[in-house]
Structures are given as C-alpha cells and as structure tokens.
Image: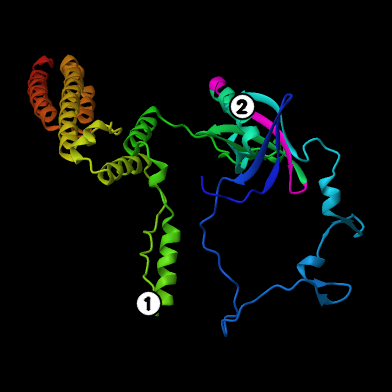
Amino acid sequence: MQHVRSIWNGAISFGLVSIPIKLVNATESHSISFRQIHTEDGGRVRYRKVCELEDREVSGAEIGKGYEDADGTIIPITDEELSHLPIPTARTIEIVAFVPADRIDPLQMSAAYYLASGGAPAAKPYTLLREALKRNNKVAIAKYALRGRERLGMLRVVGDAIAMHSLLWPDEVRSPEGVAPDVEVTVRDKELDLADALMDTLGEVDLADLHDEYREALEEVIAAKAAGETPPETPSPAASGKVLDLMAALEKSVRAAKESRGEEAAEEADVTHLPKRRATPKETGAKKSTSTRAKKTAASASSARKSTSKTAQPERKASGGAGQTKSTAKTTTSKPAPKSASKSASKSTSKGTAKKTQAKKATPRKRPA
C-alpha cells in the first residue's frame, strides 16, 4: 500500500494482548470542490475569523476550543485536557466482543480506516488477530476515542489487512417509522415475477467498472472553459411522467435491460407476460351476435307460445258472443311480437276468425219460427 500519513497512533487491546497500530484513512474523496467568488469581478470571497471582543482578525495559532454553556458562557477546553480524558480508549482500540458480520446494521457504518501494524513487534499479534477473525468468520466490536469523542468501531479482515469501520451508536440511528407508504398495497405474484425477471436480466456488476460520470462531465466543462471553448451540452433527460401501468413499465424495463446487455429480442420469450390475451373486437362482435340471435330465437318461441295460448281461449269460448269480441280485441292489441311469432300468431288468428264466422252463421238457425 502506498505511504499514507497516519491520523492516529495507538494500540489494539485484545484481552492481554496489545498490538501497536497506526490509523490510516481507507477512503478518499475525488469530488470537485468549488471556491466562492464575487460574480461581478471573479474575486475570491474568503471567510475571516474575527474575535468578537477585540473586533480583529485572529490567526489559527490563536484559535482554541470552547464549550458554550446554556447561559451563553464559554468554557475553554484545551487539547491537553482532551488527551488526558479518564477513559481507557484514549489511545487504545479496545475490543469488547466478537460477533457475526450480519449482526451489524449497515446503517451504523460511517468512516473506514485501515489499521497498519506499528513496526516489527506488532507483526505476530496483528497476524494472529487477522487469522482468528477469518477462521471464525466474525468481526470485532471495539471502542476507541478520536477527535475528542469516544466512538464505536467494527474490525474486519480486508485482504491481508485489518480494517475498521466507525459505527454510529445505536441511539444515533433514526427509526424508519413513517417512511414506508402509509396505504395498503397489494403486489401480485405476476408483478413479482416480472420484477424477478428484471433483476435477473440486470444481473451482477463488478463495482470496479462503475465510475463517477458526473465528475467526468464536470471536468470536461472546466477544461473547455479553461481553453476558451464552449462547454459541451449534456442532453437533458427525458421527462418522466407518472407511471400508469406498472406491468407495462416492468416489461419495458426488461426489454431495455436486455438490449443494453446485447441480448437478442427473441429472448423476451423468457418473460412471463401477465395480461391474458383479450378477444379482438371482431371476436367480441361475433360472440355478441351469436348470443343475440340465440336470445331472439328463444324470445320468438316464447312469444309464439303466449300468442297461441291467448288465441286458443276464444276457440274454447266460441259460443260466448260478446266475450268472443273482447278476447279477440285483446289479442289484436297486444305488443308486436318478433317476425317468427307474428307468422304463428296470424295463422292462429285467422283460424279463430273463421270459427267465429261459422258461429255467427249458426246462431239464427236456433231462433224459434
């Protein structure tokens, strides 16, 4: 590992074993920082540290630490007082337990450091701790003091080195209450199937292949302006509207992921399309017309039976005289029936009329001479 300046020197306390170590930053920031300038003339805008009592600017050598009490009183605290705090972790990373790695909530993880062995005497105990962690597949929980406060840490093996992650205290992690949606949502198995298909299509990735595209684009803009050229314009992303069809969005995502990975479109057959095939308008119309004809036929037959039964009543009451006329009138003023029923009704009506005529002719013969 390249030479990096240590930020803390101390020891790891492992039972009765003490391992001299140096704390080294394990990460570095590549983000581009900006200076504040006066927009009218480009001049730097700087902050000046001024003493409120003397109303003058003071140098860094004159600046110390102080705690502001509730009533506004400032209580000075020196670096020497901080270095002699009555705690065992002032210069020691004290291991308090060994636990499985999955016991640690990633939300607690903060800064990361490498623990470099402090010289030849530390080589043997350092290697012993490293191999013990590897063989038991565990991490060490430790307490240490850094920058004026006691902290919680997790030691784990990274390659041939021991790394330490600064952990937040459990009471520093907020509860997720109120973060999740407060409405009940039902996720169907078919939707989960498509989500699984999308996850499988995206697959895994080598984190080493990922890079900061924003920083690269910003560097291009800075280089262009430094050369007096027009900065390249980044195409604005397409406006994303509200997703109305989750299934369609999932299917489209699966297709896009496959295309980006160079997979052929034919492989889309692996995706389970959720919506069942709906009948075309032609098929729907055919079904409707068929059912309509069947209903009309049934209605025609029913109407014919009703009409036949009504016309049959005058036949049984042929000698009723006035009753015949009323029955015939009711039959003829009924609601129009379908074509097939009309034909049947007309035949029965003509037969009834013929019988009525015969009855009327026969009546005068019964009168006495």
Kindly identify the amino acid type of the residue bearing the numbered disc 2. Answer: Leu
- In the image as oriented, which residue stretches furthest toward the bottom? 41
Between disc 1 and disc 2, the foreground one is: 2
Q: How is the image coloured?
A: rainbow
Q: Are marks 1 and 2 in contact (CB under 8 Å)?
A: no
Disc 2 marks which residue?
129
Residue 226: % across, % down: 43, 76
- What residue is at 64 percent from the left and 28 percent from the top? 125
- In the depicted structure, whether residue 150 falls above or below residue 81: above
Q: Which residue is mark 1?
A: 230
From this view, report whether residue 302 is shown above or below residue 69: above
Q: Is residue 262 magenta?
A: no
Name the magenta segment's main secondary structure: strand
Q: Which mark is residue 199?
A: none
Please state which amino acid type lies under the numbered disc 1. Thr
State the residue in front, 72 or 235. Answer: 72
Q: What's drawn in magenta, residue-wise?
A: 135-148
Q: What is the quadrant of residue 14 in the picture? A: top right
Query: Could you tell me how far apart the alpha carbons at marks 1 and 2 are, in whole angstroms?
Result: 57 Å
